Amino acid sequence: GSAVRGFLPKVAAALVKKGAAVLEIDPARAERCFTAAVACAPAHPEPYVRLARMHARAKSWMSAILALEKAAELGYKKFDTLLEQEEMRSLLHFPRVRRLREGK
């Protein structure tokens, strides 16, 4: 089904919440939750943002960048706030991410 733009479908929202809750103790489970959320809501940027944050924490830079680019493609715009977060700051070393922040 299609979601109203801006609202994450309930199943995807529950998966995102569960992934965030287990991220510290079980990153593999968190990744499964976020990936399942993407499958449930492929046109919503939030699950991609969560995947990007998870990949950045693991220093999997390319995976983080690809997830951020997908979130941007889907309309995500809050890069200034997102990139202020500690685990995300290192991504600013990458020109692709700086361009996302600048809206290019």
Image (cartoon, helix red, strand yellow):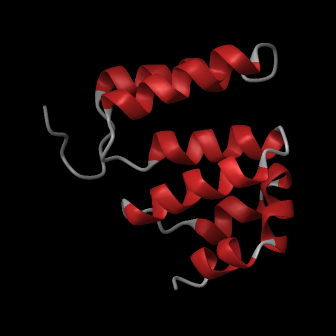
Name the residue at 29% across, 31% down.
9
Task: Find the residue positioned furthest to the front.
Answer: 62
The quarter of the picture where the N terminus appears is: top left
* Residue 22 can be seen, yes or no: no
Q: Quadrant of residue 96?
A: bottom right
Residue 43 vs 68, above or below: the answer is above
Q: Is residue 49 left or right of residue 21?
A: left
Q: At which x and y percent is residue 42?
A: 33, 40
Q: At which x and y percent is residue 31?
A: 62, 25
Residue 56 vs 35, above or below: the answer is below
Q: At which x and y percent is residue 73?
A: 40, 64
Q: Is residue 23 left or right of residue 10?
A: right
Task: Find the residue positioned furthest to the left.
Answer: 1
Residue 24 vs 5, above or below: the answer is above
Name the residue at 56% across, 48% down.
49
| Number of numbered callouts drawn | 0
Q: Which of 95/3 is in front?
A: 95
Name the residue at 71% across, 54% down.
62
Q: Quadrant of residue 79?
A: bottom right
Residue 16 vs 82, above or below: the answer is above
Q: Which of 60/4 is in front?
A: 60
Q: At which x and y percent is residue 98?
A: 69, 78
Name the residue at 14% across, 39% down.
2
* Residue 69 can be seen, yes or no: yes
